[in-house]
Image (cartoon, helix red, strand yellow):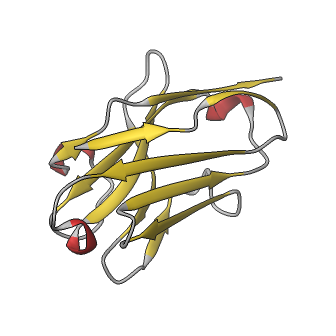
Amino acid sequence: QLVESGGGLVQAGGSLRLSCAASGRTFSSRAMAWFRQAPGKEREFVAGIDWTITTYYADSVKGRFTISRDNRKKTVALQMISLKPEDTAVYYCAARVSGIVTTAPTYDYWGQGTQVTVSS
């Protein structure tokens, strides 16, 4: 089970930190990722972190978002700075057994999502 928190309303240029709490005994071996979906758009990959702590980012968020994980606490965080109105979306935490890929259907577990709204 994955549960996201930390979304909200922020002005352009501001920052937010999303958190995803996981349950289960295999968290440390799972690849974890954040996706987002804006109204009328497909769900898109934002950032991912695998079991080796290698990180991956979409070009649109590189240099602004940072993904991290705490295996002891079974959490994954997404620190977002310099937010833009185009970052507005529902953000989802996802997990899969193998490595990081950017295609949503390959992920086995999903959270319920948390809304991020960036005003201009």
Quadrant where the N terminus is found in the figure:
top left
Q: Residue at x 36, y 72 (%)?
A: 71
* Residue 22 x, y percent position in the rendering: 30, 52
Q: Is residue 46 left or right of residue 73?
A: right
Q: Residue at x 20, y 50 (%)?
A: 107
Above-or-below relation of 18 to 79: above
Q: Is residue 68 left or right of residue 72?
A: right
* Residue 20 x, y percent position in the rendering: 42, 48
Q: Nearer the viewer, residue 44 or 79?
A: 79
Farthest-out residue, front: 73
Q: Residue at x 44, y 70 (%)?
A: 70
Farthest-out residue, top: 40
Q: Nearer the viewer, residue 72 or 31?
A: 72
* Residue 3 x, y percent position in the rendering: 35, 40
* Residue 90 x, y percent position in the rendering: 48, 28
Q: Nearer the viewer, residue 106 or 70?
A: 70
Q: Residue at x 27, y 49 (%)?
A: 103
